[in-house]
Amino acid sequence: LVPLIIISCGFWCFFELINIRLQNWYYINLPVNTIQRYGGYLLAYGTVIPAICLTEELAYILIGEINVKPFRVERYPSFAIPLGIAILFLTLIFPRYLFACTWIFAVLVVDAVNYARGYRSFMAAFEKGLAGHFVGAAIAGLVCGILWEMWNYWSISKWMYSVPFFEKGKIFEMPLPGYLGFLVFGLETVAFFNLLNGLRMSKRPVYVMFIIAAILISFLTFPLIDRFTVRW
């Protein structure tokens, strides 16, 4: 569990780095003490992957497998990976208009990598006519998102949003269209967990590299959050 918490922290920190460019959310009333503040970052970010993946497992148990008409995308990895990378760069270049794409690129890239390596992937399931885990992941993202937003709303230390074109019509602090992003975030989080699980099961040393990378990205990101994302 500890390695997963560390990797989960690094996983979310990647989006925090993107937000430095986007400036779509910011934090207020955080502890002045650095140890307390960084401990809060680790606790909050480190539970993202476990929360969504556990919720996805529960959702899948409740809804069962969903059968759909089988389909496939020809040359899926060679199509999805470049598209996802292009979407990321375009988002960083045009953040005011493409900020919503922040939550799209990763699911394309990671699920395509899983597909290419033979790990569990949404596309491989679609080819078999199965959509249960896809729907479960989307539900998990939305359920966790609603709970996070609800708990955040009444917190003293909290995040707030500054999203172009969507400052009205909020539920808790989140603009209503933003909840669609939680659906996709659930997909990309489960896809990333599938990648981790595939690497772990295959005993590839890359899994250890993910842990090291997560530690490094967290150490890099925490001070940047303090500087660019926290409103003191």
Image (cartoon, rainbow, N blue to C red):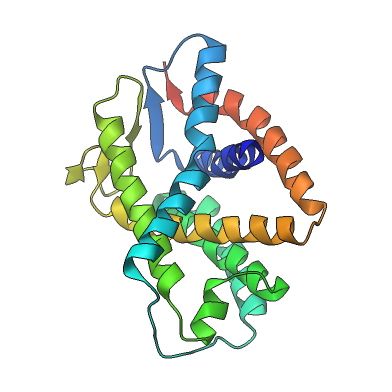
| Quarter of the view holding residue 173 | top left
Residue 88: percent from the left, percent from the top? 56, 57
Closest to the observer: 180 or 26?
Answer: 180
Closest to the observer: 118 or 61?
Answer: 61
* Left or right of residue 183: residue 193: right
* Left or right of residue 68: residue 105: right
Judge whether 177 appears above or below 220 on screen: below
Judge whether 100 appears above or below 232 on screen: below
- Residue 65 visible in rendering: yes
Quarter holding the C terminus? top left
* Left or right of residue 28: residue 72: right
Judge whether 149 appears above or below 43 on screen: below
Quarter holding the N terminus? top right
Closest to the observer: 189 or 204?
Answer: 204
| Quarter of the view holding residue 212 | top right
Residue 98: percent from the left, percent from the top? 43, 57
- Residue 89 visible in rendering: no
Residue at image position (42%, 17%) is 30
Residue projecting furthest to the front: 61
Residue projecting furthest to the right: 205
Closest to the observer: 207 or 31?
Answer: 207
Residue at image position (51%, 14%) is 36
Residue 136: percent from the left, percent from the top? 39, 64
Residue at image position (58%, 44%) is 11
Judge whether 208 appears above or below 126 on screen: above
